[in-house]
Image (spheres, grey):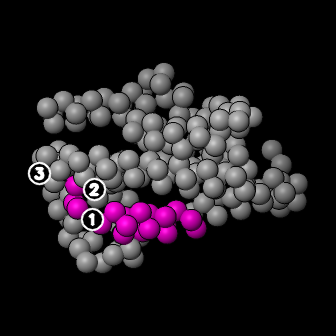
């Protein structure tokens, strides 16, 4: 069974990269769909739900955050992205936690044990430091943290602690780049 899961995930990753599915995860296409969703009253609930679904489908979390900040603007965009990323992280964590260490260990190999060893006793700051290291896809890291029995509180606060500055920088970029377009940036 774990081999089938691994094959399915590899197949999904390859499909995003090398088939027509890839057109759905291009920034321009995602921003256009998100801007259409922005006009809906359901956007407040739909954005976090889409983060969860798309992160489980291995769409890169950075792409989801950038799309949200661009589509919803420098105020609501980071808020929606923070809520969506946090909910998606928690869902991934719970999947790993409920799959259990031994089952997930067979699936993820020694990576779970390395994560456990790095975080053991380090709390929120250790989790934040772990988030700064690109260990793998967002969903896999979340699940590995759950399987490694990292305390949920440390996991969530460490994750949020790293996300906030990134989202602030994205919001600043969305605000400043159009304003600079006619002054400092060369015109195309």
Q: Classify 10 Å Cα crowding around label 3: few (below 14), some (14-19), many (20 and above).
A: few
Please name the residue shown 41% across and 52% down the image: 89
**Disc 3 to disc 1, C-alpha distance:** 15 Å
Residue 62 visible in the shown view = no
Between the residue at mark 2 and the residue at mark 3, the CA separation in whole angstroms equals: 12 Å
Q: Single out the residue that lies furthest toward the right.
A: 182
Asked where in the image residue 2 lies, by quadrant, the reply is top left
Judging by the rendered image, the residue that carries numbered circle 2 is 146
| The magenta segment | 146-165
Q: Is residue 129 magenta?
A: no
Residue identifier under label 3: 102
Q: Secondary structure at mark 1?
A: loop
Q: Secondary structure at mark 2?
A: helix
User: Which of the two residues, 165 or 75, is positioned nearer the viewer here?
Assistant: 75
User: Which residue occupies the foreground of this view, 88 or 163?
Assistant: 88
In the rendering, which numbered label is found on residue 150? 1
CA separation in Å, label 1 and label 2: 6 Å
Q: Is residue 98 left or right of residue 169?
A: left
């Amino acid at each position: 069974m774990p081999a089938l899961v691994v094959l399915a995930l590899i197949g999904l990753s390859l499909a995003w990269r090398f088939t027509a599915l890839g057109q759905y995860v291009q920034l321009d296409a995602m921003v256009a769909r998100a801007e259409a969703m922005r006009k809906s009253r359901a956007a407040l609930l739909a954005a976090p739900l889409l983060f969860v679904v798309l992160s489980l489908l291995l769409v890169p979390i950075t792409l989801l955050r950038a799309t949200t900040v661009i589509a919803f603007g420098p105020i609501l965009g980071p808020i929606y992205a923070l809520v969506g990323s946090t909910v998606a992280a928690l869902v991934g964590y719970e999947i790993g936690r409920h799959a259990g260490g031994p089952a997930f260990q067979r699936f993820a190999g020694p990576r779970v044990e390395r994560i456990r060893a790095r975080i053991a006793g380090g709390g929120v700051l250790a989790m934040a430091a772990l988030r700064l290291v690109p260990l793998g896809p967002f969903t896999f890291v979340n699940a590995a943290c759950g399987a490694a029995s990292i305390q949920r509180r440390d996991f969530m606060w460490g994750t949020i602690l790293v996300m906030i500055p990134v989202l602030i920088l994205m919001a600043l970029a969305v605000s400043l780049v159009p304003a600079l377009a006619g002054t400092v940036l060369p015109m195309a």
